[in-house]
Amino acid sequence: MMICYNCNTRLEPGTLSEEHIFPQAIGGRLTSLTLLCKKCNEHYGATIDANLAKSFEFFVAMLMLDRERSEKIPVIKNLVTDSGEKYSLRDGRFPESVEPPVTVAEGGKSYHISARNEKEFETIIRQFKDRFPEIDLEDVRSKAVRSKSYMDKALHGSLTLGGEQGLRAVAKIALNFYLHSGGDRTAVGEILPVIKGEISNEQHAHLYYIIDSLELSGKEVFHFVQVNGDPTTGLLYAYVVLFSSIGYMVTLSENYRSEKFEKSFAYDVVTLTKLEKKVITNYEGRLSYVSMVNDANMARELNSKIINSIQSHLNRIMAVAEHLQYTKGVQDYAQAAITKVLQNLNGKDVSVKDFSQQVMDIFMKDAAPFFEHFLKKRKYIQRNDATEEIPSNLD
């Protein structure tokens, strides 16, 4: 008989629930029906898992992740230019000003509309029609100037890493994987109260750096978890890495007495493929870590190592995201060119050579601004460190 590890409810039809080892909102695909009941799964999904997902919306958006139950890519908000202009980023690629789309000129005698799309434009002019019935909507539509341009300003934002709820969610990832992999349920009583929020974290879960032995190949972007248990030391702990960039250590138990345990799992969230990964770590557990961070010099050195690790791997993720977005842009323009040629043909026969030439002509014409913008952005990135500075306090 299987029971929910959180509330001990018997798992049977009506209470069974598919639990994602890594939350599906950040691209997790590995699941289990033997961990949490439906009620507990929904509770954690709406609280600590949602908090963790919010922290990683930037990664999801920039990588344009295909997630199981989430159709829309999150909108990244609170971005600013060097001059203080405020923007949001839609679909990880399209910046949109958050300034009011309607501005008043000439002492209230005229209005300027800067709609982001046709739907917004139509909504705005219909609102004007309600206020000013004499307006000719067809005249307004015909005089509207439609244009498309690429932004030549850098956008800056911030990432929130760690935090109580986020660290509890990471601890749940570690516990999920350990139990899913056949771990001893009686060995994890110390971490469960932390996950529930019944006791404070006290470094049971904390940020860590990316360990050198974790190989990063090509354009891989993966989630990783490895659990190690040793009854001779009494330590059961997990190393968790999200988006190949942010590392965590989780002490599951300091009184581990079950058999020796070592299992790992890695999954590329972009290519949706399982990877073979393993790390070698000399982590000595929560108490040893607490001793380190209580020493000012050691804490400063460790903090600097974590910050440098995050900075370096964020730069790598941005390079991967740039490649993915470039590829997506080329695909979009190619598809649009094919669609336009097919519409122009209107059923007429044409040779493959002529069809290909027409597609290429339209593609090169329409995509020229895209390529020009891409080359400008590459030059900017080469001249500047485009990744936002990371605060020194990562608690």
Image (cartoon, grey):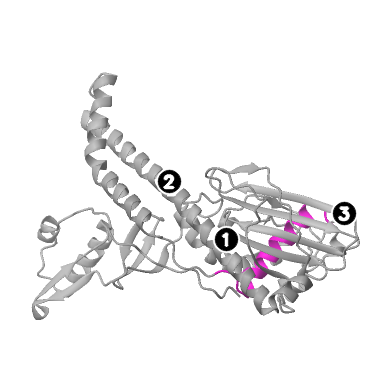
Element at label 3: loop
List x then y, in percent, for residue 86: 32, 70
For the stretch drawn in magenta, what is the main secondary structure?
helix
Residue 260 marker: 3
Residue sitting at x 36%, y 64%: 155
- Image position of 147 (left or right of 70): left
User: What quarter of the picture does the C terminus occupy?
Assistant: bottom right
Tell which of 362 and 115 is nearer to you: 362
Q: Quadrant of residue 331?
A: top left
Which region shows up in magenta?
Answer: 161-183
Q: Secondary structure at mark 1?
A: helix
Residue 168 shown in magenta = yes
At horizontal 67% and vertical 58% (from top left) the residue drawn is 240
**Image location of residue 5, percent across then percent down:** 79, 64
Location of residue 87 (image quadrant): bottom left
As for residue 244 lying within the magenta part, the answer is: no
**Mark 1 sits on what residue?**
309
Mark nearer the viewer, 1 or 3 = 1
Q: Residues within 10 Å of mark 2 (few under 14, many from 20)?
A: some
Between 313 and 295, the one nearer to me in the picture:
295
Label 2 secondary element = helix
The foreground one among 137 and 169 is: 169
Could you tell me which quadrant the N terminus lies in?
Answer: bottom right
- Residue at 44 percent across and 46 percent down: it is 324
Q: Which of disc 3 and disc 1 is earlier in sequence? A: 3
- Residue type at mark 1 is Ser
- Outermost top residue: 351
Q: Is residue 36 visible to the viewer in this orientation of the structure?
A: no
Q: CA distance from mark 2 to mark 3?
A: 42 Å
CA gap between label 1 and label 3 equals 30 Å
The residue at which mark 2 appears reads as 323
Quick one: label 1 or label 2, which is nearer the N terminus?
A: 1
